[in-house]
Image: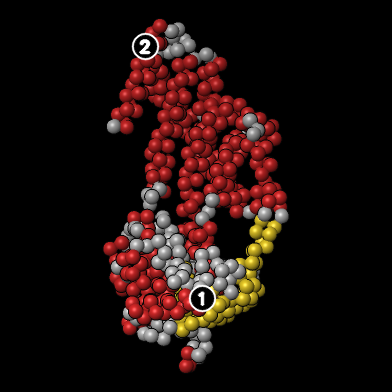
Amino acid sequence: MALLARLFSLAVLLALWQGVSVYADTRTLPAPSAVLAFILREAQSGSLFFNVGVTLGRVAVSFVIAMSLGVLLGIALGRSRLADRLLDTPLLVVLNTPALVITVLAYVWLGLTETAAIVAVALNKLPNVAVIMREGARGLDPGLEEMAKTYRFDRRTWIAHVLLPQLQPFMVAAARSGISLAWKIVLVVELLGRPNGVGFAINYYFTLFDVTAVIGYSLVFMSVMLAIDALLLQPLDAHVRRWR
Amino acid sequence: MSAAGAEPAAGAEPAALGGAAPLLTVRVDRKVYAKRGGKGGTEAVEAVSGLAFDLQAGEITCLIGPSGAGKTTTLRILLGLDRDFEGAVTPEPSRAGMAMVFQDPRLLPWRSIEQNVRLGLPRAERARDLDDLFTSLGLAPWRAHYPGALSLGMQRRVALARALALEPRILVLDEPFVSLDDAAAASLRALVVEAVARSGTSVLMVTHNVAEAIEIADRLLLVSPRPARLLASLPLDRPRPERDRAWADETRRSLAVRFPGIVAQ
């Protein structure tokens, strides 16, 4: 039923798009069929898969870096008052620095390199993860801590059965909000200083004023990211909450 | 317990013959909380002031006192969770062979009943056969369930199972029957008494329910309102099966006369 509703709204959206494009200038608003034709062409030439693959790789690497560092940082902030006091201000500064500024500075300081691109994306995402994880680590159940102490849980048992299960919902939330953030930023990073990837392709077709290509690329990449959320992150979320 | 009767309890030492040596000696001369007031000022609240007792092998001891008297504070001290007090607990809490059943059962909601019980055991003993334990507590059908699927009474049984699995020398219970209906409380009480009879475990139970204590205790420890002070240590000599309604009422009446502030008529 829910799926049906989704498909219906998608169909309405497409029909609306097709309808409007008939009356609009085809250069600024191409018809869905034209966009589909472009996607198929680009897929046949192989550059679609190459660019999407390159971008996905960047998203994946920076996502893993930002998640692992952000989770550790967030736990430290939530568990230690001193760490929180020391790092709260720098965290706020990074959190409120525009993604563009971080990206430009990364390229200036590290050069127009792959490393700079990944650092820029990871650095943009990391504070969000840390803030979400800090909330999680602050909310640990003190009753369970006492229980773990009286039953003398060893460190491994405590981490696996007491700490992580309490943090898992926060990790999944951070991952889901983080991955959409990461892929939006990665396109900007590619646009500014990479010779390949979806962001590069969109920039290239923008200079040619090829709106069909711009929409085509963004649609494909958006679908890929939605699929990752639906097929990977949502089931993970459900798995984490299965005991409720 | 029959489950692994061949194994000695964790850290078992040859007890002094004759049972004269207590399993645990607790002496809390003073325990003060620094309660934070407004504007950074701190206010000292005295929770315990002179509470000393010991626990003998195979005995059920009930610590009775009004709500908020500092009973839970005393428990936290003797469990080694709170070390900021004047006094001493011997032997060291971690070596006394204690297992705790908390008032709110404090199970891991994301782990099955079975895992909850096994995780309380040291890593080397986790794979042990616990069939008899689960069966004796009526938990066998629930082993694969999550705690959230169980009533509070059943969750307390799981907490009791987790404690008994350790084969403790001392079982510590904090208000184990509170907010249970009469039937659930009675069945859990019977399970505790039965487990004790079977394994010879010594029990320390904290409660504010005098009737409950009179029903199962070998010894009552009466505690004053905050700051907690030991008022009396009273042995109840009559064997448990012979305790009838008349005897319980009589005992309660005489306690009420002697300690009107603690035991209601």
- The residue tagged with tag 2: helix, strand or loop? helix
Are there few (<14), some (14-19), or many (20+) residues within 10 Å of tag 2?
few
Image quadrant where one finds the C terminus of chain B: bottom left
Q: Chain of mark 1?
A: B
The type of residue carrying mark 1 is Phe
Question: x, y (%) of residue B163?
Answer: 42, 71
Q: Which residue sits at x=38%, y=50%?
A: A244
Question: x, y (%) of residue A112?
Answer: 64, 32
Q: Chain of mark 2?
A: A
Looking at the image, residue B35 lies above or below residue B255: above
**Contact (CB < 8 A) between labels 2 and 1?**
no
**Which residue is the site of mark 1?**
B259
**Which residue is the site of mark 2?**
A19
Q: CA distance from mark 2 to mark 1?
A: 89 Å
Are there few (<14), some (14-19), or many (20+) residues within 10 Å of tag 1?
some
Using the rendered view, name the quadrant where residue B124 is placed.
bottom left
Observer-nearest residue: A197 or B176?
Answer: B176
Q: Look at the image and tell me whether residue A62 can be seen.
A: yes
Task: Name the colour scheme.
Answer: secondary structure
Question: x, y (%) of residue A173?
Answer: 48, 42
Q: Which residue sits at x=53%, y=69%?
A: B71
Observer-nearest residue: A25 or A243?
Answer: A243
Q: Is residue A146 left or right of residue A237?
A: right
Looking at the image, residue A83 lies above or below residue B22: above
Looking at the image, residue A157 lies above or below residue B201: above
